[in-house]
Every structure is written in C-alpha cells, then in structure tokens.
Image (tube, coloured by chain):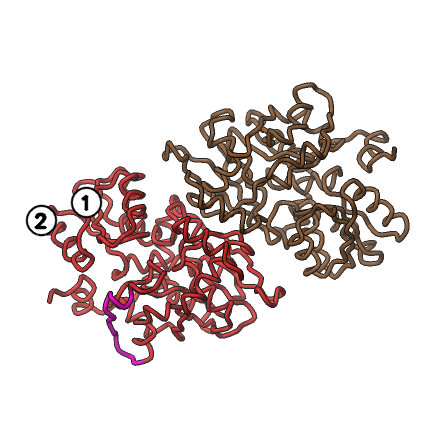
Chain colours: A brown, B red
Amino acid sequence: MEMSDGEAAQNLHPKLVTLEDITAAAERISDLALRTPVIPLPHPLRPDELLHCKAESLQPTGAFKLRGAYNTIAQVLDQARERGIVAQSSGNHARAVAWLAHRLNLRAVIVMPDAAPPTKIAAVRALGAEVEVVPSAQRDIRAKELVEEYGYVHVPPYDDLRIIAGQGTVGLELVEQLPDVDVVLVPISGGGLISGISTAVKALKPGTQVIGVEPELAADAAQSFRERRRITWEPELTYRTVADGLRTPALGVHPWEHVQRYVDDIITVSEDQILAAMRHLAVAGRLVAEPSGAVATAAWMHDLAPSGATVAAVVSGGSVDPALLASVLRAEP
Amino acid sequence: MEMSDGEAAQNLHPKLVTLEDITAAAERISDLALRTPVIPLPHPLRPDELLHCKAESLQPTGAFKLRGAYNTIAQVLDQARERGIVAQSSGNHARAVAWLAHRLNLRAVIVMPDAAPPTKIAAVRALGAEVEVVPSAQRDIRAKELVEEYGYVHVPPYDDLRIIAGQGTVGLELVEQLPDVDVVLVPISGGGLISGISTAVKALKPGTQVIGVEPELAADAAQSFRERRRITWEPELTYRTVADGLRTPALGVHPWEHVQRYVDDIITVSEDQILAAMRHLAVAGRLVAEPSGAVATAAWMHDLAPSGATVAAVVSGGSVDPALLASVLRAEP
C-alpha cells in the first residue's frame, strides 16, 4: 500500500509545528481569513455559566478549513498559478480550496467522494472548480494520480504541517481574545485543527487544557488516545455519525504526533447530544453550526468536559443541510 | 394627551447627537457590548457580489439594543443602583435592560405588552427582572407611572439622545471595519438605530448613503419620509408584519430629527422577502436573524436598495422563534 504524504514526510523528518510557524501563518492568511469572534453562550440549565464559542462557522467558506488551505497555497503560489491545484475532500476543505482558487485566480480540481451530498458538490462547482466524483475509498489515490499525471500542486486536508500551522491560528486568536481561557474544547477527526490549536495554546498558556471531542460513532481518535497507538476505524463505522465532517477513519500521521504531545484528553458525545447542541447554538447563541461544528459545545452542555473558570469551544463549521437544521429546531429541547 | 419624554425634551431644546457623543458611548459600553463582526454574504443569484453584514444578532442579548441601554444606564448608574430601573418593551430592549440589570446588580421592572410572546416574557423573568404585563397601548403610560410613583430610573427604548448615541456605535464600528462602505442599509422602526448610525456615518464618510428599510406592512417611517411629516400608523396595521421588532407605530421625536437630516431614503420589503432573507442569512451566512433583523438584507437580496461597490446591512437581531426559523428553512428558496 502506498504511503500517504504524511507518512512519507514523517519517516524522513518527524517534525512538529511551532508557535513561530503559526504566527507566520496568521500574517499570511490575514487578508482573506476572518478573525472570528468569540460569542458567549449561556448554559441551558445554569444561565450564569458561559461557554466562549470561537465561531469559525462565520468564515467566508463556512468553516476553519480556509485557514490551513490558504496558509498552504500562499507558500506555493507561483507553482499553483502555473500548474493549478488539486485537493480531495467531501466538504469544507473542498469548499475552502475552491473558494481560494476563485479568489486567487487558480485552476482547481477537487476530488470528491460519491458519498458527498449533491448540494456540497454543486457548491464547489458553483465556485468555478472542476469536480471529479470518485468512490470514497479512492479519493486520496485519485488526488495523488492527478498530481503525478498533470503536475497539480496538492493541498492536503489535514496531514500536513502547513495545514496544521494554518489551523493553529484559531488557537492564537483565542488566547488573545480570551487570555484567561483554561479549557479549550476542539472537534477532532483527522486532527489538523486540534494539532494547530494545541500547539499554540500550550506554547502561550501551558496550564490550559486542550480537549478533543469526537462523536461516539466515529471515536477512532478517542480510542487511539486511550490505547496510545494510532487506530483506524472502517468507514462503515465512522459514516454512521450525523457529523459528516468528522468521519475521517483515523488521525493523520502528523496530527498524531501533535495530539500525543499536546492534547490532554479526547472525549465523545452521542448523536442526540450533538443535535441538542446545534439547537442551543442557534437559539441561545444565534450561530448556525453543522453537526461537526457542534460537538465541542455538546460536550460542555452535557457536562462531559472538564470544568474550568473560562471554557472555550471551537464551533468549527456551519455548512448544514437546511432540512436537518429545521428538524433540530422543531425538536423539543 | 400626555407628551412623550421625547416630545417634552424636543420642545425644550431640539438637539442632535454628535460624533463625540457616539465615541464617548463606545468607550462607555466597551466592557459588556460586543464589537460585532462584519460577515460577507454572497448574493443568492450573483455569488461574486457580497453584502457586508454587521452581525448585531451576536450581541450577548441577541440584538443591538444592548448598546443604547448600556450607554444610558452607565450615565445614571448611581441613581439606578439606589432606585432601580424601569423600561417598557416587548422584546429586545426588555431583554437588554434585564440582562444589564442582572450584570450590574440593579433592580429592574420591565413593562411588557400582553401581545409579547410568552417565551420573551419568560426570558426576561429568567434574567431576574420583575415583569409587569399590561395591554399594549398602556405600556408607555405604565412605565411613566412607575417612574413617578416609585422613583425608578427610566431607560427608554429609542426616543432618547443617550439611546441614539449608544446605537450609533454600530456605525462607528462599521466605518472602521469597512472603510470603503458606500451604502449602509438599516432596519427602521422607532428610529433609534438608524439615527445613531447615520450620525456616525455622515460625520465620518459624508458620501456614504444611509438607507432605512421597513416592512411594507408597517411602513409608517417610509410614509413619514416621503411626506416629510412624522406619521403614526395604528397598531392594528403595524402588528400585521412578522417583523415583531419593527411594529412601533411611529418614529420617535428625536429620531425624526436625525432621519430628516441624515437618512437618504427609506424603502420597504414584503413579508416573503423578509423570510427569504432569514433563510439566506442562515444558509449562506451562518447567521440566525429574526425577521426584523433580516429586513435590510432582504432589500439588498431583492435588488430594492441602491447599489454600490461596498454595501453593508445591519443584521439587527437574532431572537427568533425556533419554529418560525424551522419553517423558513424548510421552504424552497
């Protein structure tokens, strides 16, 4: 079996992102990525208790993925202009890369799995990107083929140090915006987001806990953390969760290195807890979150996370099927 | 008939808020009011065209009303601590005053009309305020009685220079965040918000147009503007609109002075246009807006507003009935 980009890189020089990489990324992405606000959300049962929500759902592409994608593309812009870019993703990374290609006037091919919702495929096409739909299992291979055959510049979704540094800017901003933060809850799947955030937070505030949150039904990262080895779950398992952004079958190789060093725990939430958090974010926080974006809030709402005086959660994205959000809003709390 | 506070003040010394009043307000409210983000929203038909949404829906109380209420209370804090405060409102002003009273440890009585949704009354009670429910027509009178009988400090909803200066901080921030803005669309009802915003915008960027947006079914301000006299609509008329925050029967006296001087036009939107804008804000902007909060976006979406290179809309609030938002999300765009 072929090694992933991450595995190959890892074997050559195991490496961690640094705070300097993240501050450089912050500078690089500042013209197109939003410095997202931190929105206070009252607890549904104890309204004086607040969660501080870092609203990455408000990025112009609807999720934090813009940060890492832009930090990567900005470093290879000349080649990207000449040769075009390729990315594989079923959702928010695809949209971020397509949006950036449109803004920066680059040719982009996005490899999307046939399991991706037609609305997400249409959204990527509407941004002017070329979309290749392939069976889910083949998307990584097909992206690699396109790089080899046509020389496209690859923008990987999470197993890459430039991507991790870009996502880390969320942590940098959070510590600036909320200097007293003592617990940070972060959705986890491939691990790019929590790797960057934990690097920034531990460098700036070593006493702050960084906790990954994952759906019970796609708990490969929680199991990996517990067993101290990187474990893969079959897509048949991970695809059971409503949180379509968190179905990646395993942590990336680079993320695994960061998670082992910097993450304090990984906890899980149920599907019902995720949906209740989406509802609460919309009603009490006026934030539209997708299921993946609501898992960290779900852990806090249901008292599953470590408590702290100042707790923050990353609301990682808001690209939700309107019918799903409607059904969640109709449900009794 | 009794004069309102505004009319009495107006007769004594007709006065306009200044940019200095607004910058002083910005300083005064900065510890509790959020500097709300400006979120780019693509046009539903022409995705390269963006509306810049000033997301006041993300204020901790769900609407811009926090700004004016706090700017007022902060100037009379000693009396308020001693005597308590009173306010009349069916919605977002009530919530802002109750929330501030809770935060600042003040006694608060909120006079709410019997037409207010039970959920809004419950929300105000949950913040610890005493609520008096009265027939809609009597709420102003009852608030005045409470001031006279018990010495409460009155926090009026819009017809007050301190309130206008507080709401003006939205305009101050907007010009800082979006220095090229050339059209600003603002929901209008009692007129406090647009009075403050237009004062700030015209002082800082005299060439920028400021346009009020109102539901067709509660178009007293648009008619007043057209006929150059302050016109009152019966509540039986204004209460037809779904935009429950914009049912005030007439512009306030102080707001009317500001609107005549600084506002370029007042335009109207239909009920369907308002609901379509709520849907688009949620799906494409990840912002939960209440109907009143969506009217300015509705005018832009439906090409009713003056076009400009850089157009901004104030999304004034997000306190929406979850069932209404759900039905809007289920509707086909």
Residue B149, labelled with which disc?
2
Q: Residue furthest bottom?
A: B227
Asked if residue B16 is positioned above or below residue A28 in the image, the reply reads: below
Mark 2, secondary structure of its residue: helix
Magenta highlight range: B227-238
Task: Identify which residue is drawn at 77% across, 58% down.
Answer: A130
Left or right of A278, for residue B91: left
The percent coordinates of residue A89 (x first, y second) are: 72, 46
Identify residue for label 1: B79
Q: Specify the subunit that label 1 lies on.
A: B
Mark 1: amino acid: Gln
Looking at the picture, tell me which residue is in the foreground, B252 or A251: A251
Asked if residue A306 is positioned above or below residue B30 in the image, the reply reads: above
Q: In the rendered image, which quarter is residue B124 located in?
A: top left
Residue B291, labelled with which disc?
none
Q: Residues within 10 Å of mark 1 (few under 14, many from 20)?
A: some
- Asked if residue B233 is among those painted magenta in the image, a careful observer would answer yes
Query: Is residue A19 in view?
Result: no
Task: Identify which residue is drawn at 73% across, 25% down.
Answer: A231
- Of badges 1 and 2, nearer the viewer stands 2
Query: Is residue A223 in view?
Result: yes
Locate the N terminus of chain B and report the quarter of the image it occupies: bottom left
The Cα atoms of the two marked residues, 1 and 2, are separated by 15 Å
The percent coordinates of residue A163 (x first, y second) are: 71, 41
* N-term-proximal mark, 1 vs 2: 1
Mark 1, secondary structure of its residue: helix
Mark 2: amino acid: Glu
- Asked if residue B153 is among those painted magenta in the image, a careful observer would answer no
Q: Specify the subunit that label 2 lies on.
A: B
Looking at the picture, tell me which residue is in the foreground, B103 or A223: A223
